[in-house]
Amino acid sequence: MEKMIFVNLPVTDLSRSIAFYEAIGATADQHFRDDTAQMMKFSETICVMLLTHPRFSGFTSRKIPNAHETAQVLLCLTEESRADVDGTVAKAVSGGGAADPNPVQDHGFMYGRSFEDPDGHIWEVTWMDVEAAMAASAGAEASA
């Protein structure tokens, strides 16, 4: 079985969060849902569990921070092109999120932007020309 990742996110409004994640391309898995949680699938191996604060608190005794004020993690999704990066950020904005809470990164062979979901969780979206990145890395190693 291929390894999977489940990102568990505390949300204040489950319905709003489901609509937001559907707007950016995730699919609600009807097998894993109730009135406190919804699994959203980006792929067969990348899933986001949207959990109401009471449900999330059942997994940890730690305080849920206000993600509009603090950052504990930066999540990142890849896209096939620079245009797809911009398209995903545009979908996030039209779905109720905010564009570019972090600076846009453009290194030629790698391009990245970010968005914030309605609860303040920051997602990076990136595209990379792997061959160009490897060539740049090899050039840097050779000159060192």
Image (cartoon, rainbow, N blue to C red):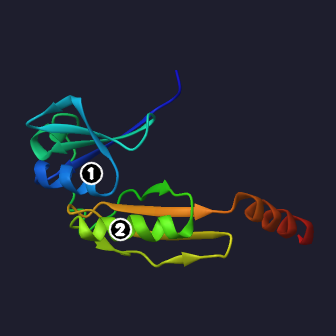
Residue that appears at 34% across and 74% down = 99
Residue that appears at 39% across and 56% down = 73
97 relative to 127 in the view: left or right: left
Closest to the observer, 42 or 64:
42
| Mark 2: secondary structure | strand
* Residue assigned mark 1: 22
53 relative to 121 in the view: left or right: left
65 relative to 102 in the view: left or right: left
Residue 86 rendering spot, x and y as whole percentages: 45, 71
* Residue assigned mark 2: 115
17 relative to 88 in the view: left or right: left
Q: Label 1: how many residues lie within 10 Å, few (<14), some (14-19) or many (20+)?
A: some
Above or below: residue 1 compared with residue 55? above
Closest to the observer, 126 or 95:
95
| Mark 1: secondary structure | helix
Report the mark closest to the observer, 2 or 1.
1
Say whether residue 71 is visible.
yes
Q: Label 2: how many residues lie within 10 Å, few (<14), some (14-19) or many (20+)?
A: many
Residue 29 rendering spot, x and y as whole percentages: 26, 34
Q: Which mark is residue 117?
A: none
Residue that appears at 49% across and 64% down = 84
Say whether residue 63 is visible.
no
Q: Quadrant of residue 93?
A: bottom left
